[in-house]
Image (cartoon, grey):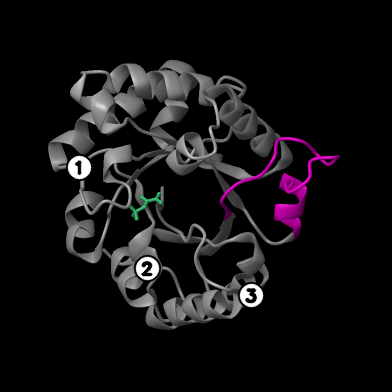
Amino acid sequence: MKKLMAGNWKMYKLKDEAKETASALVKLLDGAAPEGREVLLIPPFTALRGVRKALKKAKGFALGAQNFYPSAQGAFTGEIAPEMLLDAGCAYALAGHSERRHILGESDAFVGEKVAFGLEKGLSMILCVGETLEERNAGRLEEVVRRQMEAGLAGVAPGVAPERLTVAYEPVWAIGTGLTAGPREILDAHALVRGVLAEKFAASAASMRILYGGSVKPENANEIILLDNVDGVLVGGSSLSAESFAKIAAA
Ligand code: PEP
């Protein structure tokens, strides 16, 4: 199973800058993802076209979307459908990112609708889960992650192709704060995620990727990527620079 090194560009970069960053990243990596790695770029919608062009000849790179609405089409002003993302070259999409849960108020059930619908329409899905600092301090990590995963995966068929379903463990207190979970915290949370996956997907859970996200940077990526049950990283801030994301991708 290749490790997935994903860069979430959130609401940053105009289309030209996004294309330039993607081209620079491809150049820094000599035109191909490092051995045993898949590099995923998740730019804003308006930059998908340019980033797709920049990745055209590169090997082992993929394009992803930050969000979509779980309907084929319709009167959903401001939303975008999975088929439109596939048409724009996306292979992956995120669901349940903490910024969407906490800023946009997305519920566990709505996130679950997206995961199931995205898979059904042909996207590979990355379900993001993670506890707030308050929840962790109250000893509720397991309860929260389990609840988010059970709801997030409720509509997923037990026979789903394991390479199409990824879970990103992203403690909310470590996203964009400069705070990173320590090795023990990552090991424990990822073992929990693997266990919940195994309850639903039995043996194929072992072939599903679990990413860590939360202030991953070139300085800590080497240590994180070697941990048990860490099958890649989801990177925000440090993926905005081609130089730092190239170092992380090759960690
Ligand atoms: C993220 O956006 O998923 C993330 C982990 O952000 P950062 O790397 O900036 O903490």
Q: How many angstroms separate mark 3 from mark 2 (CA)? A: 22 Å
Disc on the earlier residue, 1 or 3: 3
Does residue 197 appear left or right of residue 118 in this picture?
Answer: left
Q: Which residues are magenta?
A: 65-87
* Residue 143 magenta-highlighted: no
Does residue 232 appear left or right of residue 89 in this picture?
Answer: left
Disc on the earlier residue, 3 or 2: 2
Residue denoted by label 2: 34
Q: Which mark is residue 181?
A: 1
**Mark 3 Cα within 10 Å, few/some/many (few <14, many 20+)?**
many
Numbered disc 1: secondary structure: loop
Query: Residue drawn 54% across and 26% down?
Result: 107
Give how far across and how far down residue 76 sits, in percent: 79, 41
Amino acid type of the residue that numbered disc 1 sits on in the rendered structure: Ala
Give how far across and how far down residue 88 sits, in percent: 72, 61
Disc on the earlier residue, 2 or 1: 2
Q: How many angstroms separate mark 1 from mark 3 (CA)? A: 34 Å
Q: Do the residues under discs 1 and 3 have CB atoms within 8 angstroms? A: no
| Disc 2 versus disc 1: nearer the observer | 1
**Mark 1 Cα within 10 Å, few/some/many (few <14, many 20+)?**
many
Residue denoted by label 3: 50
Q: Do the residues under discs 3 and 2 have CB atoms within 8 angstroms? A: no
